[in-house]
Image (cartoon, rainbow, N blue to C red):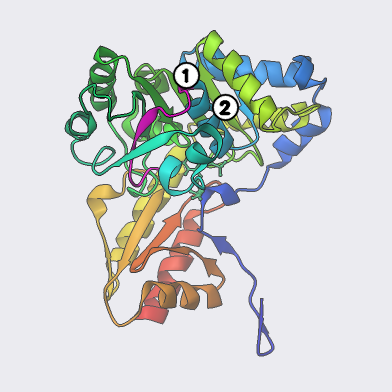
Amino acid sequence: MAQQGVITIISVDLRSDTLTLPSLKMREAMSMAPVGDDVYGEDPTINKLQEAAAALVGKEAALFNPSGTMGNQLALLSHTSRGDEAIVDEDAHIYYYEVGAPAMWGGISIKPVRGLLSGEGPEAFLEALRPADIHFPLTRLLCLENTFNRGGGTVMAPETMTKIYSLARERSINVHLDGARIFNAAVALDRDVREFTASCDSVMFCLSKGLGAPVGSMLAGSRGFIEKARKYRKALGGGMRQAGVLAAAGLVALDNIARLREDHQNARVLAEGMAALPGISVDMDRVHTNIVVLRAQGRLSAAEIVALLGERGIRCATFGPDLIRMVTHLNISPEDVEYTIKAARELIS
Ligand code: TLP
């Protein structure tokens, strides 16, 4: 970015943990990966990743996908039939950020619910239910999201998930977990990830966020469910060939789970530093993992703060009219956090 003869080198990218760059170890693994045609089920590296992913989250089988969005949408398609209803938080990624795909591909009626992922999840779920009636669609699916992106990276405890899951099961409603950042949740509470994934019929998790892979998300569930999802993936053009080169990076990414703790520590320091500035507030009770949401409440708007930080090579994004999101990740160091707070103090005070 050049400005009146001054060159600004972008050095701190806090827009998302999707911005991580593949490590040298990943690039080496990619170059050496044995591959085959995955549409024929013959890519050994993809098969290895799928087996590792299924075991990690305690499910029978898993499927490698180009993106988290595709993983979530395959789950919706596989759990429902045209005209069925899925209950989803109004701020969930599946509803808020996935282009209306459930309607586009599946003819699925989404019931957006407030408070499902924050506050009282089980109560919000029960309130969303309607009696069997000729006027109402059949509710087949409930979607959870952990951590909750628009909630500010908040964690839902496994106990709450278990409660919701048993309420759903009593009503023959399947549960899909958008676990794009489920390892952040597990690391934050120091719990095994299977304590979360035991309370869902299917789970999608991303390799390409804090875990650092350039591409890829896993969808896991029962063997029958994954076979169905594989067919939908093919129908949507997601049948990949020698994609073992990508799965190889995914296998290396699985080694990065424990490291997420560093992102959480960096996020806390960042949140505390930013909250101390005039005109900015942070709800510290919602800083659980690697996402920090700032509220602009002084003379500068959220967009103005984002623009000012950009002049110092710090990239972040507005998250609503008066909100800014900052996300820590593999390529954000404690020094980057210090630099960000110092620059913000100079610019905003
Ligand atoms: N989230 C992205 C954007 O799409 C908003 C981000 O920068 O946070 N579930 C959750 C909870 C997500 O946060 C995301 C990505 C996805 C699914 C989709 O993953 P991709 O980007 O791989 O399709």
Query: Does any portion of residue 75 appear in the rendered image?
Result: yes
How far apart are labels 2 and 1 at the CA level? 10 Å
Q: Which residue is mark 1?
A: 57
Q: Vertically, is 11 above or below 70?
A: below
> Ligand 1: does it lie within 8 Å of the C-beta at label 1?
no
**Quick check: can you spot residue 251?**
no
* 90 part of magenta stretch: yes
Q: Residue 194 versus residue 166: which sits nearer the camera?
A: 166
Mark 1 element type: helix
Which residues make up the magenta segment? Answer: 79-92
Direction from residue 175 to residue 49 in the image, left or right: right
**Count of numbered labels shown in the rendering:** 2
User: Which quarter of the image is occupied by the C terminus?
Assistant: bottom left
Comes first in the chain, label 2 or label 1: 1
Rendered residue at 42%/51% (across/down): 266
Q: Is residue 11 above or below residue 167?
A: below
- Check if residue 263 falls in the magenta segment: no
Residue 315 locus on image (x, y percent): 53, 65
Type of amino acid under label 2: Met
Q: Nearest to the eye among marks 2 and 1: give it.
A: 2
Measured from the top left, where is residue 312 in percent x and y?
54, 75
User: Mark 2 near mark 1, Cβ–Cβ under 8 Å?
Assistant: yes
Q: Quadrant of the N terminus?
A: bottom right
